[in-house]
Image: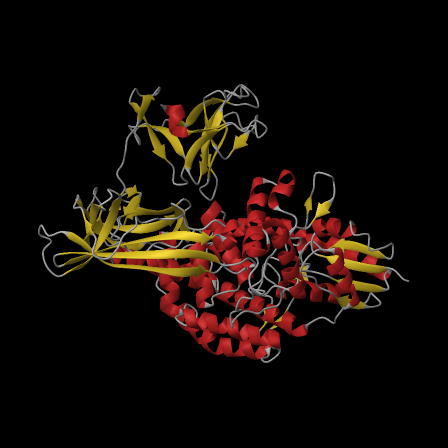
Amino acid sequence: MGKNLIIVESPTKVKSIEKFKLGKNYKVTACAGHVRDLPSNTLGVDENNGFEPQYEIIHDKEKIVSELQSQAKDADTVYLAPDPDREGEAIACHIAVLLKDKAKDIKRIQFNEITKKAILEALEHPRDLDVNLFHAQQARRVLDRLVGYKISPLLWKTVKRGISAGRVQSVALRLIVERELEREAFRPEEYWLFHALLKTPQGEPIRLELAKVDDSLGEQPFMVTKVESRRRERQPQPPFITSTLQQVANTRHGYSAKRTMGIAQRLYEGIEMKDGSVTALITYMRTDSTRISDEAKAAAADFIAAEYGRDYLPAEKRSFKVKETAQDAHEAIRPVDVTIVPEAVRPSLTDEQYNVYRLVWARFVASQMAVAVYSDTSVTAACGGTEWQAKGQRQLFDGWTRVLPGDKDSLLPDLSEGMELARGVIEKEQKFTQPPARYSEASLVRSLEELGIGRPSTYATIITTLENREYVEKKERAFVPTELGRVVCRQLLDCFPNLMDVHFTADMENKLDMVAEGTEGWVELLTDFSRDFNPSLDKAAKEMKNFKGGMETNLVCPDCGKPLLIRFGKAGAFLACQGYPDCKYSSNFVRDAEGVLSPAASEVTVVGTCPDCGSDLIVKRARTGSRFIACSSYPECRHTSPYTTGVVCPKCSKGHLVEKSSKKGKLFYSCDRYPDCDFATWNEPVARVCPDCGSPYLVIRRTRQGDELACPNRECGYTAPLHDEES
């Protein structure tokens, strides 16, 4: 038997597959992701020649390509085994083009899980490359290139240099901006809740809520008018698909979509265990199907029966409906081996790997278990012309909640119709209607999926791009559009209404699916798109509003009375006088809940005396965001110095750590002896000694629960609430 070369995407996969000992006739190597792409500095698409892409080898992949070509020469068969999706198919096709003159035979294989059985089965059933899948990925890539490279220069000219537009990301931005506008237009309305705290004849307390009012309450007695009980079965949720995993990981653990997918990728490719072996724990994590193989269902049934008893098995194997829009290319996300319980591998996993594996494992096992059974009770009581209600539940059988705990019991006392309840306190609570909630990562992913915008594999990229472009920022784990995001959204809505239309974007996804199925041509798709896009582009080049000089506001300059404008600097948007450079007034600003602008209140902190003129030294903030010390007599006195944290540099023990900011406005802290000392850290240092390891300083770390103090030495692990240390 001749030599065979298997090409996967990542080096981690190589380790996982090599442990299976496929035989000396198989060599496994990695391409490290994409090896060819459109050029980075030009459009790279020949629109006059059928949108022909002008691919080139990615800059840092020349060596990898050369090694693959060399290895392919010595192989009888090259098996291309990137991930089982469109992106993976594209990688395989690009590698095939680069190896076609070197390899004797090229085949495509794919597997949904990294197990010996799955890989051997894939090798027994190789296939040809799927040109339709490749064309679907290529069409998406060219679409995004046309939009990005042709609209972005218009935004550079009219808003701010260096920003850009994206076909799908811009629609996601529209959702966030329009939600914020809804909140600003919202006017709260008052309402009241009333509760009656009563007692049964046996003295047991019960709390009822006012449900209906026909007359005044008066002093009449409370009489039980109806008691209803019914048996309720609660079904488990389906196993995870990409979007639901991202949502639950965000809600439960605060992980971003990008972070979740990175963790899941490691669990899929393989984790090095304490014994030195590499084990893949979950199946492929980019999927929109809830389908589970019969083999996996049988394995789950055996595990459940052995671990919890046969009562916990459903009457028949459970299947979940697959959405009509799902590609259904492979199974839902599940554990490779259901008998590998999370606690058994916890010593080999990081905390975040354990958390995600626990989510996947528990959700899958629960999906194959019996229903949870409850007894629901509802009570209605009357008092004069008012009606009051209370509801309770009692779990009769835990079923799948044995793995994923559900709602707790909320028991009501024994009641019967005609029973009189002893009057107690009537509580009233003033409430106000609330505006629609801002999008969190979880709710944004849910909306993107429901609206058909993008695909599961793109959600993390969409969100990351919006943040990196500084179109949105997070406040209390929810997305708020920045001023830059607002104006970009406005520009695109005015000039490219189709591109920003939710239904248009969703329809484009459906057309890309048709290309993948071979029922529509990719060139025809791009031709149809260009018929609307190119005229809109020409019109935008002439009519797009120019905000380079600033956006008008209804505020006036306190120094000269001229209008104030919103301008965009390196550290974000700020207010500046229209009379600049004659008037140099500028200020940060805030928007209130109704969207009304106002200059930010200036808080002057005096920290000393100027050594040059004797005036007060005050804390100021640079346009890039970092604080610095300056003389209050500026511009007459120009004395400045860095803002020091008071922490002695842990590297050189001579300088002090001072606050600085990067070009993009991100704060960091570095030694004031730079370049003689190059120590730097992103976390704000605090001049306190670690009580556990003696580190001369601690750092402020941001967490879901709030800010905390932490030791910078990872081996130490000391943490404390920030307020505890400051008290």
Q: Depth check: give the residue in front, 397 or 492.
A: 397
Q: Depth check: give the residue in front, 499 or 245.
A: 245
Q: Position of residue 466 (x, y in %)?
A: 46, 55
Quarter containing the N terminus = bottom right
Residue occupying image coordinates x 67% and y 66%? 89
- Furthest residue in direction right, as rendered: 1
Q: Position of residue 245 (x, y in %)?
A: 52, 55
Q: Depth check: give the residue in front, 347 or 618.
A: 347
Residue occupying image coordinates x 53% and y 28%? 674
Q: Position of residue 679 (x, y in %)?
A: 55, 29
**Residue 267 higher or lower than 457, as above or below:** above
Q: Is residue 382 left or right of residue 176?
A: left
Residue occupying image coordinates x 62% and y 40%? 346
Quarter containing the C terminus = top left
Color scheme of the displayed model: secondary structure
Q: Position of residue 253 (x, y in %)?
A: 48, 45
